[in-house]
Amino acid sequence: MKKQTTQSPFDAATIAKMANAKSQGKRPEYFSDPMAEQHFSITMALMAELAVARERIDSLERVLVSKGLIGSNEVEEYEPDAATGQTRQLAQVEYSARVLRPLQQAVEAMSGDQSSMSDMADKLSDPDNG
C-alpha cells in the first residue's frame, strides 16, 4: 500500500512569489537612520498582522462558544496533529518572508540585485562567498 502525502497549499514557488512581491510607489521614511527605518517598518507590519489576527481569533472563539460548539477552555486545551503542525509551519515561513520583506528590499537597493530570498540565503550560507 502506497503512503499518501498531503500536498501543502504553500509550495516553495508560491512562498517565494509572495515574498518577492513589491509594493507600488515610494515607501514613506520617518527616520534618518536606515536601520531604524527598517525596524520601524517590521514593527508596524507585525502590529498590523497581530491586530487583525487577534480580532479574528476573538470573534471566532466568541461565535463558537455562543453557539455551544466549543467550551470556553477548548482552544487552550487543543493539541494539533502532525498534518496541522506542518501546515502551520509552512504558513509561518510565508509570514516570516512577508514581515522581513523590508530588509530584503534594503539589500536589493544596496546591491542593485533582484535576488530572491532563497538566493540570498544561499549566498549568505556559502562559506566561499564572502
Image: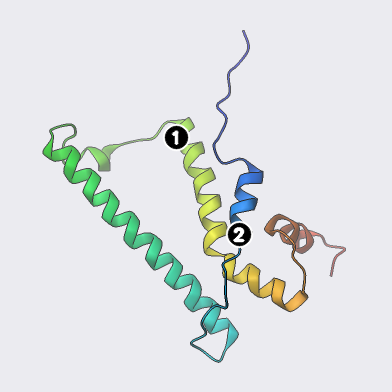
- The residue labelled by disc 1 is 84
Q: What is the three-letter code of the residue carrying label 2?
A: Ala
- Alpha carbon separation for disc pair 1 and 2: 27 Å
> Viewer-proximal residue, 18 or 47?
18
- How many residues crowd mark 2 within 10 Å: few (<14), some (14–19), many (20+)? few
Please tell me which residue is depicted at 51% across the width and 89% down the height of the picture.
Answer: 31
Q: For numbered disc 2, what is the local secondary structure?
A: loop
Amino acid residing under circle 1: Thr
Q: Which residue is mark 2?
A: 21
Q: Nearer the viewer, residue 119 or 20?
A: 20
Residue lying at 45% horizontally and 72% vertically, measured from the top left: 43
Q: Which mark is residue 25?
A: none
Between label 1 and label 2, give the one nearer the viewer: 2
Q: Disc 1 or 2, which lies upstream in sequence?
A: 2
Left or right: residue 8 versus residue 104 is: left
Name the residue rendered at 75%, 57% in the picture.
Answer: 119
Q: Residue at x 54, y 44 (%)?
A: 90
Give coordinates of residue 1: x percent, y percent. Answer: 62, 7
Indicate the quadrant where residue 117 lies. bottom right
